[in-house]
Each structure stands twice: as structure tokens, then as C-alpha cells.
Amino acid sequence: AQSVTQPDIHITVSEGASLELRCNYSYGATPYLFWYVQSPGQGLQLLLKYFSGDTLVQGIKGFEAEFKRSQSSFNLRKPSVHWSDAAEYFCAVGALYNQGGKLIFGQGTELSVKP
Amino acid sequence: NAGVMQNPRHLVRRRGQEARLRCSPMKGHSHVYWYRQLPEEGLKFMVYLQKENIIDESGMPKERFSAEFPKEGPSILRIQQVVRGDSAAYFCASSEADTQYFGPGTRLTVL
């Protein structure tokens, strides 16, 4: 079955500390992987995506993620967290639009940032 | 280039009424996806449409829910005879190739 697991429902980090949000997936075909961020009451904003090539991808707002096929993981990282990063983060896996295109989302990780 | 637009942003309906949610994709995008987010949960796929065609409706409830994306105008998600369990945030996304861009969502409350 196709699924995405984000093991951490809620994480709290201090401002300036490093961050890693975990994401594991189960997908039968070549996975296309995404991280989105959702602020309260808002829609989802794309942080970064992985389709192929270099397994370390850079995104907006200083985020990066590393695709590890052997571990079926696509963890999101940031070296120094800012208070404005407090939000909910969703990992998603999907296919090309001509192969169905729908995204399967994890349950999300809520990030709180301590001053 | 305007992003994905959804309206209304908030919708309140009483049980048994109909809800119509609208989504205007980004300019040049011909693929539209609808997702539902229940409280404390991630997004769940509902339906994938291209102009005048439903491509995948595997996530749509069998009854009361329908979707369309006409040749002209926005995509519509229609929920007939709403029940309290339909209360959720409904998000639309559009794409032209491989990346989906999301709208701000419509938050439906059923009283």
C-alpha cells in the first residue's frame, strides 16, 4: 500500500537550533517527493521537491531534504530555525500527472519554536 | 501570475443543505486536484480533473459528492445534503506538469 509516515506529530526546537523532520514512504513506483508547509488557517506552500538526480535538494527559506532510497526516507532539515518557521509541515509522495498525479500526504509534523 | 484561487474561504451550512466550492487554477494550468483535510489530519486526495474530464475520483465518497471542471470557468466541488462529518478544509491544487500548487482552501462548517 502507498503511504507516508511522519513519526513526529509535534516537535519543539529553540530558535537558532537545527531541525530535522522525518518522513518515510511506501510507494510501488518511482517516488516523486515533496515537502509543503502550512501556516495556521492557510493553504500549503511548496518548500522543495525531488524527482531525480542529486539526492540532496535545496528549497526555499533555507530548507533542504535528502532522499535515501535504501531507507525509503526523505527527511527535511534546516541548520538554524527562525521563529517564523513555526508551522505544520507535510511530506507527500506522488506520481507524474500522466500516471495519476495524486499526492499521498503524511499526517504532518507541527513545529513550535521557543525563543 | 495569480496563484490558485478558492472561494468562498469560509462556508457555513446547515445539515441537509448543499455546499458549492469553487477553484480557479493558476493561469495555464489544466490539471486540478481536490483534497480534504479533516481536523488534526493530513490531506486526503479526493478527485483529479482535467478540462471537461474526471481522471481519477477514487477518493470521492460514493454519495453526495461530485466535481466538475468545465471548459470555461472554475472547477466546482459540490456536496449535497451536507452532514456534520463533512466539516473540513477543502483544498484545491493545480498543475501543468509535475508540481501541484495549492489554494488557500475553503473551510466548511456544517451546523
Image (cartoon, coloured by chain):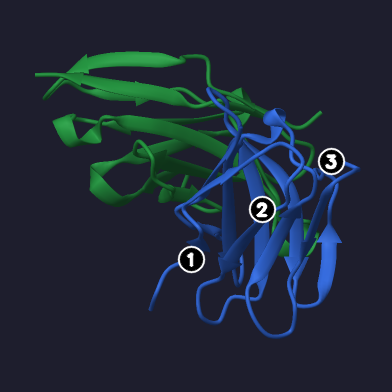
Chain colours: A green, B blue
Q: Which residue is mark 1?
A: B4
- Frontmost of labels 3 and 1 is 3
Read off the residue under disc 3: B61
The answer for how far apart the CA atoms under marks 3 and 1 are is 24 Å
Residue located at (85% from left, 46% from top): B64
Marks 2 and 3 belong to one chain: yes
Front position among marks 2 and 3: 3
Which of the two discs, 2 and 3, labels the residue nearer the N terminus?
Answer: 2
Q: CA distance from mark 2 to mark 3?
A: 12 Å
**Quadrant hosting residue A77:** top left
Q: How much space separates mark 1 and mark 2, taking CA atoms? A: 12 Å
Task: Report x, y in % for residue B31.
Answer: 67, 69
Q: Amino acid at mark 3?
A: Pro
- Per the image, the residue denoted by label 2 is B34
- Nearest the eye: B87 or A108: B87
Say which residue appears at 73% left-offset and 47% top-offset: B17
Task: Specify few, some or many for label 1: CA neighbours under 10 Å numbering under 14, 14-19, or 20 or more.
Answer: many
Q: Given the image, on which type of amino acid does mark 1 rest?
A: Val
SS for dot 3: loop
Disc assigned to residue B101: none
Q: Chain of mark 1?
A: B
What secondary structure is found at the residue carrying circle 2?
Answer: strand
Disc with the residue nearer the chain's start (3 vs 1): 1
Q: Position of residue B13 (x, y in %)?
A: 62, 43
